[in-house]
Image (cartoon, rainbow, N blue to C red):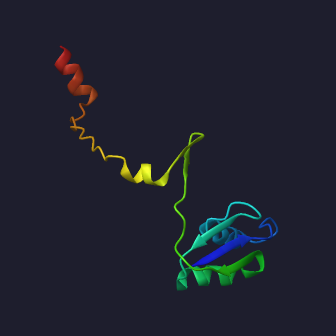
């Protein structure tokens, strides 16, 4: 597992590098994220290596807290929430002409 920290700002860099840093999940300077050690992540790190500090750590990524509208919700609670599928019956839309004929 890799622990990645953004140590330099992306302000003076090209948009492609900014998007790469965003894709890694880094939002601001000194922000730290953890990713599995995969070739894809290694390639992204290589493209913006001058902006990052990378450590190899043991273990798996921690469960993250999800923030929605200012409230923190534990990751377990989000996963345990029941999935409710709403089935909306599609009604055919009537044209203005058909609606006018129906009202007459």
Q: Nearer the viewer, residue 58 or 4?
A: 58
Q: Is residue 18 above or below residue 71?
A: below
Total numbered labels placed on residues in the image: 0
Q: Nearer the viewer, residue 55 or 104?
A: 55
Dividing the picture into quadrants, the one containing residue 23 is: bottom right
- The percent position of residue 92, horizontal first and vertical second, equals 21, 36
Quarter the N terminus occupies:
bottom right
Residue at 52% across, 61% down = 63
Left or right of 78? Residue 3 is: right
Residue that extends furthest to the front in the rendered view of this protein: 58
Left or right of 15? Residue 88 is: left
- The percent position of residue 68, horizontal first and vertical second, equals 54, 44
Q: Is residue 64 above or below residue 15?
A: above
Left or right of 78? Residue 66 is: right
- The percent position of residue 16, horizontal first and vertical second, equals 67, 72
Residue at 71% across, 71% down = 5
Dividing the picture into quadrants, the one containing residue 12 is: bottom right
Residue at 28% across, 27% down = 96
Dividing the picture into quadrants, the one containing residue 9 is: bottom right
Residue at 74% across, 77% down = 53
Q: Is residue 40 above or below residue 64?
A: below
Quarter the C terminus occupies:
top left
Q: Nearer the viewer, residue 56 or 24?
A: 56
- The percent position of residue 26, horizontal first and vertical second, equals 66, 65
């Amino acid at each position: 597992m890799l622990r990645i920290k953004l140590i330099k700002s992306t302000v003076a860099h090209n948009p492609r590098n900014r998007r790469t840093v965003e894709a890694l999940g880094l939002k601001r300077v000194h922000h730290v994220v953890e990713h599995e050690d995969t070739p894809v992540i290694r390639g992204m790190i290589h493209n913006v290596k001058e902006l990052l500090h990378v450590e190899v750590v043991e273990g798996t990524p921690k469960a993250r807290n999800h923030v929605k509208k200012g409230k923190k919700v534990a990751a377990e609670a989000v996963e345990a929430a029941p999935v409710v599928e709403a089935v909306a019956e599609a009604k055919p839309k009537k044209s203005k002409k058909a609606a006018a004929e129906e009202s007459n």
